[in-house]
Image (spheres, grey):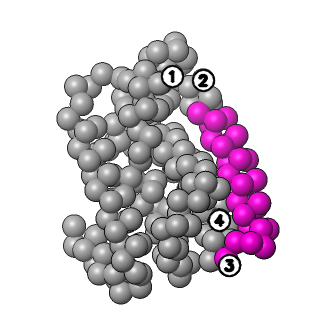
Amino acid sequence: MRAFEELRREAAALTGPDWQARHDADFRSHLDSSLAQLSADGTVPTVPQYLTHREPDGAARCAADWVELAHGLDLPDHLHRHPQLTDLLTRFQHLVRWTGDLGAGRTATAAPGRTLPRALEVHRGLPPHSAAARVAELCAAELTVLEFLADGIARGSHWPTSVRRHARGLVRHAHALIHWTAAR
């Protein structure tokens, strides 16, 4: 908890009120989602239930916030609401969530019953290795789309430099996350 408190203080010194409010909302969403998972009755959600319930993923949005901060950016809300950036962030959120799910089956602290691979095993009848392979394929496809969208933003001269840097940073973070998860 102290680490989060220290991060929050440091972030407040580096960012404006828009970033802080957005990050606080994302972090609350992450905590709410985590509490909902802990209080779940242990059943495995169907694939549509999984995707619907986990769509507002605060953890992935927090990661995007930290990518923004790590690059010394403080993007105004009107840019975050722009459809192209919203689509890019949605793809990033999918990658963070699904990559995390792939790694969740290999850690003792994870809730493997509440992951996309587990949903595919239970409700689609896939063996564990096939379910993981299916999610890995889904991640690869989503990464391709993320890279395409980010490249379009990064090359768009109408975008402020800060947005172009953020788009590139999201792609770098996604690659690093995938590499780190695969190495675990």
Residue that carries the numbered disc 1 in the rendered image: 120
Magenta residues, dominant SS class: helix
Sooner in the amino-acid sequence: mark 4 or mark 1: 1
Compared to residue 16, the image places residue 22 above or below, namely above
**Mark 1–mark 2 CB contact (< 8 Å):** yes
Compared to residue 46, the image places residue 173 above or below, namely below
Residues rendered magenta in the picture: 135-160
Question: Which x, y percent locates residue 16?
Answer: 40, 81
Q: What type is the residue that disc 2 sits on?
A: Ser
Spot the residue most to the front.
78
Picture quarter containing residue 5? bottom left
Residue that carries the numbered disc 4 in the rendered image: 167
Picture quarter containing residue 43? top left
Badge 3: residue crowd in 10 Å (few <14, some 14–19, many ≥20): some
Q: Residue at x 62, y 29 (%)?
A: 134
Q: What type is the residue that disc 1 sits on?
A: Leu
Sooner in the amino-acid sequence: mark 2 or mark 4: 2
Q: Residue at x 40, y 54 (%)?
A: 59
Q: What secondary structure is marked by label 1? A: helix
Sooner in the amino-acid sequence: mark 2 or mark 3: 2
In this view, the mark in front (2 or 4): 4
Residue that carries the numbered disc 2 in the rendered image: 130
| Left or right relative to 114: residue 172 | right
Q: Which mark is residue 161?
A: 3
Picture quarter containing residue 19? bottom left
Q: What secondary structure is marked by label 2? A: helix
